[in-house]
Amino acid sequence: MSVEWVPEIDSTNTELMRRARAGDAAPVLLVTDRQTAGRGRLGRPWQSASDAGPGRLDESLTFSLGLPLAPVDWSGLSLAVGASVADSLDPTGTQLRLKWPNDLWTVQDRKLGGILIETAMPHVAEAQRYVVIGIGINIGPRPAEGLSTAPAWLQEFRPDATAPHALADIAAPLVRNVLRFAARGFAPFAQDFAARDALRGRVVSLSDGTIGACEGVGPGGELLVRTAAGLQSITSSEVSVRPA
Ligand code: BTN
């Protein structure tokens, strides 16, 4: 696996997807100080604090891990990735929660970071795809303009945090855990995710307007929501917490 750093790029995910489509399926970790067209889930832009000005390593960590993978079952990968990152940044489990399916939240429900997973077509072997795992984490306090909700930052509970240190903590366990996921699926991560689950036990609303009580996640990482119509198993939806 190679590690590449570039001072500026449109998006680390876009770059690795471009390479994969051009036939380059080499494992790589691509990190940048600044994205000019960072992407979030559901086609939203992703703006890190340092995107607004010259790259500053104390403001955000922005990287993508790309590697060929052939898991038995893809479901739950973003949850396993979230659990790995949260464990690296908050080993005691007191600061960070995971908001299904791909957000890192503080215990006060503020977003510290997000995960964007994309896959390109198989290149090397049957059932194999090139998976690009993009991770953006707010490190320092300068709030990114245009964000609708107040973000959280790592230095709130790790005052000396910098992007390189955070990356050093995150990277090796992340690669190990992604390979573990490929071999064994979501099961080995289920307990870890449950311990950090920000939605379990809370009233949530889904993007189709359904409201229900979240009962955690199922064996494949699907969100379980008890609604008037019974227990629903959600595989894709926007979810927000209803104010108490
Ligand atoms: C989200 O919260 O919607 C996901 C945000 C993912 C952002 C990261 S930053 C590195 C990688 N490159 C991108 O363009 N997006 C991901």
Image (cartoon, rainbow, N blue to C red):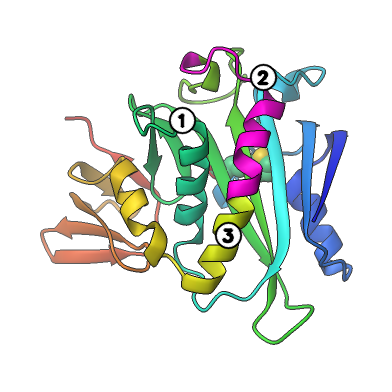
Dot 1, crowdedness within 10 Å: few (<14), some or many (≥20)? many
Q: Earlier in the sequence, mark 3 or mark 2?
A: 2
Residue lying at 17% horizontally and 44% vertically, measured from the top left: 201
Judge depth for marks 3 and 2 and give the one in front.
Answer: 3
How far from the left and from the top, in percent, is residue 206? 31, 51
| Residue that carries the numbered disc 2 in the rendered image | 59
| Residue that carries the numbered disc 3 in the rendered image | 178
Q: Residue 227 vs residue 50: left or right?
A: left
How far from the left and from the top, in percent, is residue 227? 15, 58
Instruction: Report the amino acid beneath label 3.
Output: Val
Mark 2 residue element: loop
| Residue that carries the numbered disc 1 in the rendered image | 111
Mark 3, ligand 1, within 8 Å: the answer is no
Is 81 in front, or is 206? Answer: 81
What is the distance, in whole Å, between disc 3 and disc 1 at their CAs?
23 Å
Question: What range is drawn magenta here?
Answer: 156-173
Is 243 in front, or is 7? Answer: 7
Residue lying at 31% horizontally and 54% vertically, measured from the top left: 191
- Tag 3 and tag 1, C-beta contact below 8 Å: no
Residue lying at 73% horizontally and 78% vertically, measured from the top left: 122
Residue lying at 25% horizontally and 59% vertically, measured from the top left: 224
How far from the left and from the top, in percent, is residue 91? 44, 34
Mark 3 residue element: helix
